[in-house]
Amino acid sequence: MKLYCADWVLPIRSSPIRNGAVLIDDLHRIADVGPAEILIPKYPSIKPNLLEHAIILPGLVNAHTHLELSMMKNVVPAGLDFSEWAFQTITTRMNFSEATVLADCEKAIRSMVESGTVAVGDIANHAATALPYLRRSGLYATVFNEVTGFANHIAKQRFEEFFSKIVSFDDERIQQTLAPHAPYSVSKPLFELIGRHLHSENSRTSIHLAESIDEVEFLKTGVGPMKSMIERIGRWDASWSAPGQSPVEYVHSLGLLGDRTMVVHAVHVNENDLSILAETRSFVCTCPRSNARIDVGGTAPVKRMLEAGITVCIGTDSLASCDDLVLWNEMKALHSIHPSIPPETVLKMATLNGAQAIGFGERIGSIETGKDAALIAIRSIQKTEDPFACLVKGLDFLTEITKL
């Protein structure tokens, strides 16, 4: 048993504890939490670990990234419109050797661990790439095996192909599932196959949705830059017809939304879309730095999502569209774009909300008795009176991150 004491303990589900303490048992689970003045005499046989100028909190959850694209940092220029960015990403990612892909994937995972991330939602095209490194890292992970296939006639073939890529192994910290990529890369028959599988297995999933204005135009009218991009990569299906709906409406009509679905980006959503996401209890993952780097045509209305009762989490997206996978930087960017969102809400988005979205909410994401002790301690050179603002705004006196 270990007893850690700090200036602040941030349980997330309950009020912050000034001069707090957390007791961790020999199975590395949280055995108790509360004020140090109560816990220290309560456990007289345990020598307390006094962490000076420190904040104890749940480790961060990067709910959406693409580890397999870690070799793509600064390869595609910033500022391109979304369809052009997608074209360049698709056509250049195959230029890298397997050794480079593996090395940069391992480096990316290490950077997340070192910056206080304890769990990740990873989009995988080849699950075997990142899995060995994820297993060694100690991270909790949900690997979303991403399915693509725009042509109607290849739906069954593509479903079987991607289903076969799921790697079987026994590790309670890592889950695997299937995830349709996006409405502009997955045909209706393929969506239906994926949906039936997910419902039969009661599996959670993820989908890129309403990310760009190009996507909205394409689903409404069937034309525009998105159609041109699909034609350029040789995947156009002349039998396809536009549903004439918003991305959220279209995917909802296919039965893909629900409390086990994480919608990623949701930049272009109207009031009806927000109502659908709230009513279906779908999670939304926002990636503000990625949306700023690529010209997606707007900014996600995160404050409106929260007001609608939607559970919002945070992801970095990949190094193809972001400078790093450090979630602190994503939180800082989010708060700078939406300064009216309280820092404590932003921190909850990066911890408990993310854990719930990727399926680990019962085990991590908050400091509660019985949960796994996936906790970190942040040290600084001086005390702080506002730990939430300190963490979210990225004040300069943060000096050290330690996994407890």
Image (cartoon, rainbow, N blue to C red):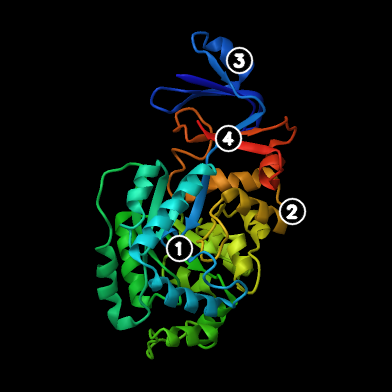
Mark 3 or mark 4, which has the lower sequence index?
3
Query: Mark 4 = which residue?
Result: 57
Dot 3 falls on a residue whose secondary structure is helix
Q: Residue at x 32, y 50 (%)?
A: 132
User: What's the amino acid at mark 4?
Assistant: Leu
> Is 265 displayed left or right of 200 in the figure?
right
Identified at 57% across, 50% down, the residue is 327
Q: Nearer the viewer, mark 1 or mark 3?
A: 1
Instruction: Label 1, secondary structure: give it.
Output: helix
For the residues marked 1 and 3, what is the alpha-carbon distance in whole angstroms? 49 Å
Q: Is residue 371 left or right of residue 41?
A: left
Identify the mark at residue 38; answer none if there is no mark.
3
Specify few, some or many for label 2: CA neighbours under 10 Å numbering under 14, 14-19, or 20 or more.
few
> Residue beneath label 2, please?
339
Give whichever of discs 1 and 3 has the lower sequence position. Answer: 3
Disc 1 and disc 2 in contact, CB within 8 angstroms:
no
Residue at mark 4 to residue at mark 2: CA–CA distance: 22 Å
Task: Identify the residue position indicated by label 1 in the image.
Answer: 71
Task: Tell which residue pokes out farthest to the bottom in this image.
Answer: 238
Q: Amino acid at mark 2?
A: Pro
Question: Residue 175 in the image: x percent, y percent?
Answer: 35, 49
Q: Is residue 115 above or below residue 283?
A: above
Total number of numbered discs in the rendering: 4
**Foreground of the two, 186 or 257:** 186
Query: Closer to the N terminus: mark 4 or mark 1?
Result: 4
Residue 380 point in image, percent of width and height:
67, 33
